Image: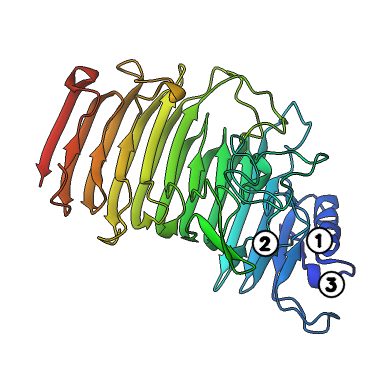
Amino acid sequence: MSITVFSFNPNNYSGTDSECFEQALADLKAAGGGTLHVSARTAERKDHRNYWLLDRALLLESNTSLIIDNCTLKLSDQCRDNFIRSGNCGLGITNVETMTDIHILGIGNAKLIGADHPRATGDSGKQLGERTYGTDAGKTDMHPKGNWQNIGVLMAYVRNFSVRNLEISDSHCWAMSFEHCSNGILSNLRFSSTSFKMIDGKEEKILNQDGIDLRQGCHDIVIDTVMGHTGDDLIALTAIGNHTPAGSIDSTMVSGTLPTGDDDIYNVTIRNVIGCSAGCCNIVRFLNNFGCRIHHIILDGLLDISPENHRSSTTIRIGDSNPRWGGVTPLGDTFGFLISNVQCNSNRSIFIPGSLADSIISNVMNHNPDCAAIIFDSGRENTRNIVLNAVV
């Protein structure tokens, strides 16, 4: 029995670029799923622009594959939204239902690029116009801070997903973030951001430009082959729950941070990372608190390419002692790490200001003579059963 796979291309529709995408996605949804195949924007369109300009996020439903085929998607100056979001979440959606089988694939030179004049940047703690750039700054009818709308690719409660072969430049906040997602693959991803952007001849600050963020409830995920530089952490696994409801405009998590009973991050493999933090933050960060745990983590193969005159803050950071993040986690909440084959060139190599238990750190080479290869900043009393092997 043959299976029909429906494929739609926004080039076959009329209207603004966002209207073309939305018509194609509506037809795809009516067909019960299929592929949105985005090729280069046709030259016949009246403005002769060869890249797609998005005013609103592309909302992907279950059983959808988005193929970005040798072309560029760029956010317009009117857009205060994600590039791409799972269609189960958004402003005012307080019950985020699980979706399945959402896949994003770049072919060849596939790019996502931020706006020339972003309306908002940064996370939910950043005031526009004071700490981070945004043309909405000072407008009384606009939300005055950043939030989850500034994230590039955002998925919540998606099972069986993948994002492959994309380059994301000048993101407005985190390039991609996943909340309560499972059984996923993130591979061959490239990032280019620096924590600032030249806008109208002036250097403007843009904060929170992480590359990949896994948030509460993410598990059974592989991150394979990540390259480039970001304005903040290149990769961050953060389970830092508080009490923000889903759909709130005041949060950086669209699905909310209310405890669900399944907020741990676990069974995550990270391998083949070549990059640095141009914003002098961390290359890989692990952070959990308030009862959320991180465990069963493999990090194998990290090449820190920080230049000597502009080093990243830390190659690998585990936990935090800052009360803002809940302080040092109880011993046993962060455990089961296998970290191996790491070359460090940051101001701190492997920095552990939190707790860590039942873990192995091996084959670490530190190239910065001004710091130790491993720093147990919170004291060895906050560690248990840590095996170190071939740490130079």
Q: CA distance from mark 3 to mark 1?
A: 13 Å
Up/down of 236 relative to 109, above or below:
above
Q: Amino acid at mark 1?
A: Ser
Callout 3–callout 1 Cβ contact below 8 Å: no
Q: Which residue is mark 1?
A: 18
Q: Quadrant of the N terminus?
A: bottom right
3 vs 2, front mark: 2
Eye-nearest disc, 2 or 1: 2
Residue 42 horizontal side relative to residue 117, left or right? right
State the image quarter where residue 122 is shown: top right
Could you tell me how far apart the alpha carbons at marks 2 and 1 are, in whole angstroms? Answer: 15 Å
Q: Is 122 left, or right, of 346 in this rendering?
A: right
Q: Are marks 3 and 2 in contact (CB under 8 Å)?
A: no
**Looking at the image, which residue is at 42% across and 52% down?**
279
**Residue 67 seen in this snapshot:** yes
Residue labelled with disc 2: 115
From the viewer's side, name the closer residue of 225 and 159.
225
Label whose residue precedes the other's in the sequence (2 or 1): 1
Q: Amino acid at mark 3?
A: Asn
Name the spot of residue 159 as percent of width and height, x first: 59, 39
Q: Tell me the element at label 3.
A: helix
Which residue occupies the foreground of this view, 285 or 185?
285
Query: Viewed as shown, does residue 47 lie left or right of 108?
Result: right
Please, what is the three-letter code of the amino acid marked with disc 2?
Ala
Q: Residue at x 84, y 72 (%)?
A: 12
Which residue is the site of mark 3?
Answer: 12
Q: Are marks 2 and 1 in contact (CB under 8 Å)?
A: no
Q: Specify few, some or many for label 3: CA neighbours under 10 Å numbering under 14, 14-19, or 20 or more.
A: few
Residue 5 location (% of width, % of height): 73, 60
